[in-house]
Image (cartoon, grey):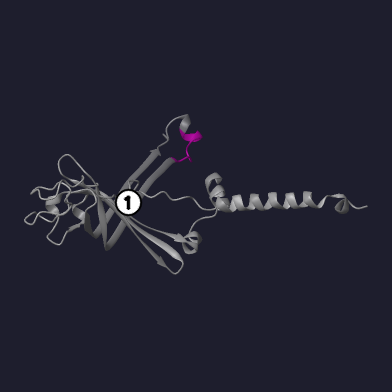
């Protein structure tokens, strides 16, 4: 009887499952997980107002609206504000270095006496040159334009607003994310309830995507392994 017939069917099935599990694990290691740079909560709910007092009173602390003559700019947790992303950063760097060094040495042999006969036809000379030239340069350009409406997630002691939010777009089986967080000075908010991203402190802007197109742009796990251990 052959070894194949003596091997139980369930044993072969278990081996196949183990192999598939290993392949799935290796496939899962093919992509490096991306952690978003905006780690704070993306939204916040406004606080629950206190219970309404007895009807008929002039002052009602349970009223959640805004007074008639109060500025309508965001100032509380849960308010929304529009961020106009207008980032345009250019950086250029260049450097160069040159060094030259030349040397020349001649040794004259005297012709008088016994040295004249020994070194009469000898000419000793040495020449040396050392040249160094190095140049380097770098150029970077980044442009990001768009708008995103975020939520006030906190209010600092000085009145500055901690804002964060995200926008998701599903395009051609790829989920794209736009995330934003930062600290906004209420005085920079315009009458249209908007502020430029260049006026936001500690701004963190992220544009990323998930899907098979994004996975195709990542390096495989085996290629990353050889890239890390390769000496060249």
- Classify 220 as above or below 105: below
**Pick the front one: 209 or 134:** 209
Single out the residue that lies furthest toward the bottom. 172
Single out the residue that lies furthest toward the right. 1
Q: Position of residue 106 (x, y in %)?
A: 39, 39
Question: What residue would you read off at disc 1?
Answer: 42
**Pick the front one: 155 or 231:** 155
In the image, the segment drawn in magenta is 116-124
Q: Position of residue 116 (x, y in %)?
A: 46, 34
Q: Position of residue 51 (x, y in %)?
A: 21, 45
Q: How many marks?
A: 1
- Classify 115 as above or below 77: above
Inspect the magenta stretch and tell me whether residue 137 lies in it. Answer: no
**Pick the front one: 148 or 223:** 148
- Classify 179 as above or below 111: below
| Residue neighbourhood size for the residue with mark 1, other residues' Cα within 10 Å, grouped as few (<14), some (14–19), many (≥20) | some
Residue for point 13% across, 48% down: 60
Residue for point 51% across, 55% down: 219
Q: Position of residue 86 (x, y in %)?
A: 23, 60
Q: Would residue 208 appear left or right of 224 to someone viewing this image?
A: left
Residue 197 found in image quarter: bottom left
Q: Would residue 112 appear left or right of 74 to someone viewing this image?
A: right
């Amino acid at each position: 009887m052959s070894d194949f017939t003596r091997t139980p069917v369930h044993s072969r099935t278990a081996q196949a499952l183990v192999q598939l599990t290993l392949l799935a694990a290796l496939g899962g290691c093919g992509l490096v997980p991306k952690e978003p740079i905006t780690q704070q909560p993306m939204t916040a709910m406004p606080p629950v107002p206190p219970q309404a007092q007895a009807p008929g009173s002039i002052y009602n602390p349970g009223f959640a609206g805004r007074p008639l003559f109060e500025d309508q700019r965001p100032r509380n947790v849960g308010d929304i504000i529009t961020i106009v992303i207008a980032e345009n950063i250019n950086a250029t760097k260049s450097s160069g270095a040159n060094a030259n060094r030349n040397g020349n040495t001649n040794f004259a042999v005297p012709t008088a006496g016994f040295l004249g006969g020994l070194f009469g036809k000898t000419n000793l000379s040495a020449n040396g040159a050392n040249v160094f030239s190095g140049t380097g340069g770098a150029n970077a350009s980044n442009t990001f334009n768009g708008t995103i409406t975020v939520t006030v997630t906190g209010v600092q002691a000085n009145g500055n607003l901690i804002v964060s939010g995200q926008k998701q777009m599903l395009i051609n089986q790829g989920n794209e994310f736009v995330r934003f967080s930062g600290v906004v000075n209420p005085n920079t908010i315009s009458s249209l309830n908007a502020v430029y991203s260049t006026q936001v402190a500690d701004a963190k802007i992220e544009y990323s995507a998930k899907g098979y197109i994004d996975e195709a742009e990542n390096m495989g796990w085996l290629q990353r392994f050889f890239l890390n251990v390769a000496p060249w």
